[in-house]
């Protein structure tokens, strides 16, 4: 199944079938449940509390609760009434909580005089009334609007209105009658349009699916057809992977630092190791803080284009900083080692520290087309050392015909601080399928993604489509809280993004990240300790 195909549809499936597939952990099936009933739940919530934002928040909570407790639904055919029951309970809880908060607020407001409280309340009400009043009146012709406004402001006196506007009484009566009719029509249209525009969009579905992405429902021991839904073991695996993936970079960095310290021989080299790791971490933290700040500032809805520009500028700055840091690291390591050999010769007397010691590098005897099958560098790079080159390669700079791992890695499957390949994983990854902090390529998954189809948590810049929980910008379709494209947060955008299939592939992408980031780092650190630690 390809990300470039349109999303598979579930419209013909019954509620019972959708529930059974969802019980197996199929988030794509549950996504259809959300789409099918989100308008119903949001409408019930809105009609109870009268606030669009809070009603959607409550409806989202109801869907998340349904995902968690799906196994308690004894009769899947009664899915709709079961969801409504959860929703009504959430609404009741919200009302009780609101009443409790209001009581606390009332107590805290006792210090204010009654006159001050009434003034504050009146001011807030007036602002809302004025906005609603003008929204309605502005749709009327001025010929009818002026007499109507004057009539109610002049004590409902037709004579006074006629005198002020220099009109006859009959004309005023005619215009007032027409004005009242227009006012009713305008108010009716306003309410109808407001209700129609307030229905939940695809962004609501995205929010629910994001919330449940790391939550696995209990799986029933039943089989519906051939492979109708996943097993409970797979659901537990998905939960484990979703927890492990965010920690993969930290785990890998720890083992990389340990390997670098095992390679170091002088205090200066150890200090440089700590500074190098710290510089990468600080850059990542600054990038993350700026992105979260921009998302918070942009959430008000103003200057959307400007904030999207600033977000992407931050991403490109992060990319540039990592290229510069990697370049500095690769040039400084051998230069520092050469200086330390001269300054502290007594610290390099061990056999393992000789420049030509074979334990510093492993090159397999087996070659294919003149290229070693495996070439791994375990020691600190020396001046004039070449990069590791093999079918499988590892080192500060590694070029592999199949797989490469290192500070700068290039291979069909590459893992590194900066990685380039068909499948690439790294802090900055470039590839057909790129996974990383910043992922660039045909399809990109990351904290930020720049790709033909971009999927990210903070910002996505896509040619065809973009999805993120922050900024999303694309030519055709974009989904996200702050999004720009031809189609934004609607069904057409959902088709461009192929959100259901992304949700289905998410666990696989996280598993790939965990395996490719953690396993080579642990193996490399272990081998370095065995060969180079003194």
Image (cartoon, helix red, strand yellow):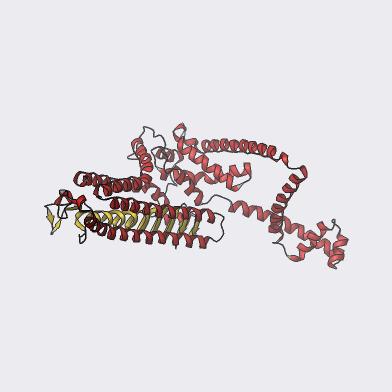
Q: Position of residue 372 (x, y in %)?
A: 15, 55
Q: Which image quadrant is residue 287 in? A: bottom left
Q: Position of residue 532 (x, y in %)?
A: 20, 47
Q: Position of residue 303 (x, y in %)?
A: 55, 61
Foreground residue among 477 and 459: 459
Report if residue 300 is visible in the image.
Answer: yes
Foreground residue among 490 and 461: 461
Report if residue 476 is visible in the image.
Answer: no
Residue positioned 32% across, 56% down in the render? 433
Left or right: 465 in relation to 430: right
Residue at the far bottom: name it.
Answer: 166
Residue positioned 17% across, 48% down in the render? 350
Left or right: 241 in relation to 394: right
Q: Position of residue 429 (x, y in %)?
A: 33, 56
**With respect to residue 284, does 224 lie above or below?**
above
Left or right: 154 in relation to 284: right
Q: How many marks?
A: 0
- Quarter in which the C terminus is drawn: top left
């Amino acid at each position: 199944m390809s990300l470039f195909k349109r999303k598979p549809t579930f419209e013909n499936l019954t509620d019972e079938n959708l529930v059974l597939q969802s019980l197996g952990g199929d988030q794509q099936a549950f996504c259809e449940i959300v789409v099918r009933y989100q308008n119903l739940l949001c409408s019930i919530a809105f009609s109870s509390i009268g606030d669009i934002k809070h009603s959607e928040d409550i409806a989202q909570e109801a869907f998340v609760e349904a995902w968690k407790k799906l196994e308690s639904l004894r009769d899947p055919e009664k899915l709709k009434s079961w969801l409504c029951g959860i929703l009504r309970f959430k609404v009741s809880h919200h009302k009780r909580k609101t009443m409790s908060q209001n009581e606390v607020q009332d107590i805290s407001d006792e210090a204010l005089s009654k006159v001050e409280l009434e003034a504050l309340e009146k001011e807030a009400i007036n602002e809302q009334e004025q906005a609603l009043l003008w929204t309605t009146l502005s749709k009327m012709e001025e010929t009818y609007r002026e007499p109507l406004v004057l009539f109610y402001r002049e004590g409902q006196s037709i004579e006074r209105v006629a005198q002020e506007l220099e009109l006859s009484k009959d004309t005023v009566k005619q215009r007032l009658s027409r004005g009242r009719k227009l006012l009713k029509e305008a108010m009716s249209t306003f309410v109808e349009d407001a209700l129609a525009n307030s229905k939940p969009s695809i962004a609501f579905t995205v929010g629910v699916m994001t919330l449940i992405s790391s939550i696995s429902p209990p799986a029933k021991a039943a089989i519906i057809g051939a492979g109708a839904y996943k097993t409970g073991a797979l659901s537990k695996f998905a939960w484990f992977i979703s927890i492990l993936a965010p920690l993969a970079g930290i785990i890998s960095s720890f083992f990389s630092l340990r390997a670098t310290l095992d390679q170091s021989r002088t205090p200066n080299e150890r200090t440089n190791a700590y500074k190098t790791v710290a510089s990468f971490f600080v850059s990542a933290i600054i990038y993350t803080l700026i992105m979260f700040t921009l998302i918070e500032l942009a959430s008000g809805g103003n200057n959307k284009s400007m904030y999207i520009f600033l977000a992407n500028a931050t991403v490109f700055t992060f990319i540039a900083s990592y290229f510069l840091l990697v370049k500095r690291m690769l040039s400084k390591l051998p230069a520092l080692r050469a200086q330390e050999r001269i300054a502290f010769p007594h610290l390099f007397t061990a056999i393992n520290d000789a420049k030509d010691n074979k334990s510093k590098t492993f090159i397999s005897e087996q070659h294919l087309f003149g290229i070693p099958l495996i070439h791994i560098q375990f020691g600190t790079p020396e001046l004039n050392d070449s990069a590791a080159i093999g079918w499988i390669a590892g080192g500060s700079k590694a070029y592999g015909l199949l797989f490469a791992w290192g500070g700068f890695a290039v291979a069909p499957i590459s893992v590194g601080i900066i990685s380039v390949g068909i499948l690439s994983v790294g802090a900055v990854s470039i590839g057909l399928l790129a996974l990383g902090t910043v992922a660039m390529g045909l399809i990109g998954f990351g904290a930020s993604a720049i790709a033909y189809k971009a999927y990210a948590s903070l910002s996505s810049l896509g040619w065809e489509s973009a999805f993120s929980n922050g900024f999303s910008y694309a030519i055709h379709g974009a989904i996200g809280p702050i999004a720009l494209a031809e189609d934004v947060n609607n069904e057409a955008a959902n088709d461009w993004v192929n959100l259901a299939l992304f949700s289905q592939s998410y666990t696989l992408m996280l598993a790939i990240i965990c395996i490719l980031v953690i396993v080579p780092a642990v193996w490399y650190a272990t081998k370095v300790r065995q060969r180079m630690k003194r």
